[in-house]
Amino acid sequence: MIDLRILRDNPELVRASQRARGADPASVDVLLTADESRRAAVSRADALRAEQKAVSNSVRTASPEERPAVLAKAKELAAEVKQAEAEQAEAERALRTAHLAVPNIASPAAPPGGENDFVVLTTVGEPPAVDQPRDHLDIGTELRAIDTERGAKVSGARFYFLTGIGAQLELALVNLAMAKAGELGFTPVIAPALVKPETMEGTGFLGAHAAEVYRLAEDELYLVGTSEVALAGYHSAEILELADLPLRYAGFSSCFRREAGSYGKDTRGIIRVHWFDKVEMFSYVAVDEAEDEHQRLLGWEREFLDSLELSYRVIDVAAGDLGSSATRKFDIEAWFPSQGSYRELTSTSNCTTFQARRLNIRTRYPDGLGPVATLNGTLCAVSRTIACLLDHHQQPDGSVYVPAALRPWLGGVELLTPAR
C-alpha cells in the first residue's frame, strides 16, 4: 500500500504516477474520499464513546430524580456508539478496498508509457554471429534435453520435460546461482510454492494480476509465480531489528503462471511456460537504503549473466509495465540469435514500503516504528536461461559451448554434443 500521508500531502504526485502508468487517476480521488470518510467515522465513534463514558460515570452521582433521564441518555448513547462503530468498520473496509486498488507510486525516474516505452541503459557484449541459427527447441530436441511433445501429452500446452543433459543443466544452473548467492551473503531458502491469500494479496499479485495466478479453490491456497511471494510473507507481522538489516534471502521454488493474455506468444519451446523453477533474491532493508540495494541487486544479476558469457542489455522498464508493487524495475534481456532480438532473462524491482505495509513488516527507526523496504531480483529463471544458453552458444557443428562457470557443475564438460 502507498503511504496515506503522501496521498494527503501531495495527491497530485499520486495522480501523476497513475497517468505515467496509464492507469485511471480517478482511483486516487476514490482513495482520498475513503480516507476522509474513515477518519470522520473514527472521530465520530471516538467522540460518542467519550460522551457515553462521561454519562455512564455520572449515573453514580445523579440524584434519584435525575437518574432515569441519565440512564435513558446512556442507553441512547450505547445505541449510537454501536451504530457509529458499525459505520467505522464499514469505512475501514471501504478504505482498504480503495487502498489496495492504487499501485505503488512510480519513481519519477521511471520512463512513462507502456511495455514498449522502456529505455536501454547499457548493452554488454557483442551478439554472436551465427549463420542460419536454429532455435533452442530444435537444439534441445537434438541434444535430447527438452521434450515438449510429451510435456503436452502429460500436462497440456506450455509444459515440458527436461531430460538427460537438460535436467543436468537445470541442476547446474541452480547450484551455480545458489553458490553465487551464498558468496554474496544471501541465506539460501527452499520456499513453498503454495501460499495463503493474504500472502499473495500482500505482495500485490492479486487484483490486476489475479488472472495470472493459479488458485486452489478447495484449499484456499495459491500457486506462486515467483518465490518473491513466499519470501515477502516470511517476515509478515514481524518487527525486524534495524541492526539486523539488510536481511537477504535467495529462494528456490517452482513457479506457476497461467500466462493469461499471452495466447499465441512464444508457444514454441520453453521461453513462456506455465511451470518453471527459479532462484530469486529478496531483500529487506531500511527505507533509505532501498535505491542503493536496487543497484546492488542489478549488479549481482549482471555478474551472474557475465559468468554465463551472454550478450545482454539492461533496460529501465516504463511505468505502465512495472506491476503494482514496484516503484522502479530494471530488466536484463539476453540475445537470442534465432530470434535476432533481446529477450528478458532477469528483472529486479524496488517495491519501497508497498509490500511491507500490506504485510505489516516494520523496524524500529530512531524516530519510531515504521515499515521496511522490500526488493526482489531474479538470479536465474531456469527454463528461459536454458533456452538462452542453447540458442546463444550454439556452434556450427550442432554442438553447444558450455560457459566455464557451469563446467564444474557438469563434470567438466566443455561442449554439449547431439546424441547419435
Image: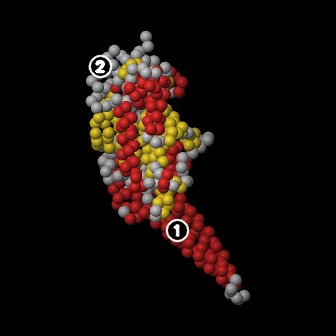
Left or right for 231, reference 6: right
Residue 122, disc: none
Q: How many marks?
A: 2
Q: Picture coordinates of residue 153 (x, y %)?
A: 52, 22
Residue drawn at (51%, 36%), measured in percent from left and top? 253
The local secondary structure at tag 2 comes to: loop
Per the image, the residue denoted by label 1 is 41
> From the viewer's perspective, is residue 193 above or below residue 53?
above
Question: Can residue 414 be seen in the rendering of this structure?
Answer: yes
Query: Badges 1 and 2: C-beta atoms under 8 Å apart?
Result: no
In the image, which is nearer the foreground, mark 1 or mark 2? 2
**Crowdedness near tag 1: few (<14), some (14–19) or many (≥20) residues, C-alpha within 10 Å:** many
Mark found first going from the N terminus, 1 or 2: 1
Per the image, the residue denoted by label 2 is 132
Q: Amino acid at mark 1?
A: Ala
**Which residue is more in the foreground, 126 or 407?**
407
Residue drawn at (31%, 26%), measured in percent from left and top? 337
Quadrant position of residue 315? top left
Q: Picture coordinates of residue 137 (x, y %)?
A: 40, 22
Q: Amino acid at mark 2?
A: Gln
Quadrant position of residue 217? top right
